[in-house]
Structures are given as C-alpha cells and as structure tokens.
Image (cartoon, rainbow, N blue to C red):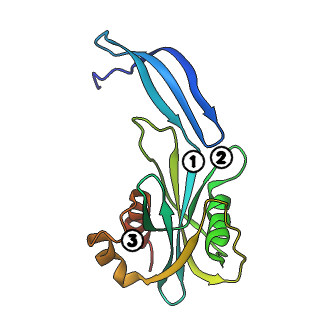
C-alpha cells in the first residue's frame, strides 16, 4: 500500500478556450496543506501515431517545420483526434494517408501512454502498419508543409542516436513497434 496522496482540486476554470489552445487554471491543495493558486493544465486532444513500414522494409516518415522549436523534425505520421468521435486506429490510418499518400490495409495497436501528465491531458496512441503502399491522396492541413521520407528500418537506430530523429512519441513508437516486426 502506498502512502502517496492525490492533490485536492479546490477550484478550476478555463483560462483560455481557443480552438487551437485550451488551458485550464486550477487552484489546488497539496497533501501537505499548501495551496497553489495558478496550476495551469493544457487541455489537448489525444494523438494517433502510426509506424508505417513498406514491403521493402522502409519506414515512412514526414519531415516538417515545428514552430514551437522553430526547426524541422523527422517524425512518424500523426495527428490529434477526439476519442469520442473516432477511434485511434481510424485516426492513425487517416493521418497516414493525409500526410503521406500511403495507405494501410491492416493496423496493429502497439500501446497507449500519456505524453506529459504533469501539465497535459492527452494520451498518445501508437499503431503499427506493415506493407503500406502509396495509393492514397494527400490532404494536408493549412499548417502542414510536409516532405515524405523513406528510411530503411536498419538505419533508424543510428538516426535516433545522432539526434536526427528526436521527437519523443516517434522514438517511443519506433522502439516499441520495431520489436513487434517479424
């Protein structure tokens, strides 16, 4: 039995309620009785990430600009979704086609975990798709300008170690998913 105690939520209000950003402002009481007036929580949609592998054992990545860091990143296709409106599997397959033009006929769930539970509410849902093929149509969002990159499975670990692939959800999906590939 653990002696850990949950924090007590005293008050909560939406500090920012915008389609692109939702922030909740909580007043909390810690187990030691101390009050924190301004504990901000980002209300974020869940994210579906897909690890797409071609029949030639190449992984389909996207390279795109990320304004928060002001740089370009190599990532697996991914996108936000509302679990009450669509499944993570559907969102993963949809994002794969929209961002890359590749389609998956069979998808396997890898794992679900929290992104940053200290300040964010969302979960990451990871999926594996083998034998993907380029048969679909791109449908990029207004904020997306994407370069599709194919990287051999055998070259991925070195790219992670060199920092060329360095986005946490992508790295987690690669390590977890590639262990499932035959």
CA distance for labels 3 and 1:
24 Å
Residue 98 location (% of width, % of height): 67, 69
Reading the chain from its start, which is encountered first: label 2 or label 3?
2
Q: Nearer the viewer, mark 2 or mark 3?
A: 2
Give me the residue at 32% from left, 70% from top.
160
Name the residue nearer the viewer: 66 or 157. 66
For residue 159, what is the image quadrant? bottom left
CA distance for labels 2 and 3:
26 Å
Name the residue nearer the viewer: 46 or 130. 46
Q: Mark 3 points at which residue?
A: 179
Reading the chain from its start, which is encountered first: label 3 or label 1?
1
Up-down relation of residue 172 to residue 55 (above or below): above
Q: Name the residue under label 2.
A: 83
Q: How crowded is mark 2: few (under 14 residues within 10 Å), some or many (20 or more)?
A: few
Residue 39 location (% of width, % of height): 42, 24
In this view, the residue farthest toward the bottom is: 56
Residue 75 location (% of width, % of height): 47, 67
**Image quadrant containing the C terminus:** bottom left
Q: Name the residue under label 1.
A: 46
Residue 176 location (% of width, % of height): 40, 64
Q: Nearer the viewer, mark 1 or mark 2?
A: 1
State the SS at label 1.
strand
Name the residue nearer the viewer: 90 or 180. 90
Q: Nearer the viewer, mark 3 or mark 1?
A: 1
Give me the residue at 66% from left, 46% from top.
82
Asked if disc 3 and disc 1 are in contact, CB closer than 8 Å, the reply is no
**Image quadrant containing the N terminus:** top left
Asked if disc 2 and disc 3 are in contact, CB closer than 8 Å, the reply is no
Asked if disc 1 and disc 2 are in contact, CB closer than 8 Å, the reply is yes
Reading the chain from its start, which is encountered first: label 1 or label 2?
1
């Amino acid at each position: 039995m653990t002696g850990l105690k949950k924090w007590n939520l005293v008050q909560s209000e939406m500090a920012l309620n915008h389609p692109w950003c939702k922030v909740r402002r909580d007043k909390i009481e810690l187990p030691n009785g101390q009050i924190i007036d301004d504990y901000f929580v980002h209300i974020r949609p869940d994210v579906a990430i897909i690890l797409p592998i071609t029949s030639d054992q190449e992984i389909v990545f996207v390279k795109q600009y990320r304004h928060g860091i002001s740089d370009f990143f190599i990532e697996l296709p991914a996108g936000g979704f509302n679990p009450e409106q669509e499944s993570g599997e559907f969102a993963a397959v949809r994002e794969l086609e929209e961002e890359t033009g590749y389609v998956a006929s069979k998808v396997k769930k890898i794992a679900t975990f929290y992104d940053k539970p200290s300040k964010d509410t969302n979960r990451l849902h990871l999926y594996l798709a083998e034998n993907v093929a380029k048969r679909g149509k791109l449908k990029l969002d207004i904020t997306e300008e994407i370069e599709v990159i194919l990287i051999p499975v055998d070259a991925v670990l070195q790219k992670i170690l060199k920092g060329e692939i360095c986005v946490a959800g992508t790295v987690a999906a690669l390590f977890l998913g590639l262990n499932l590939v035959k």
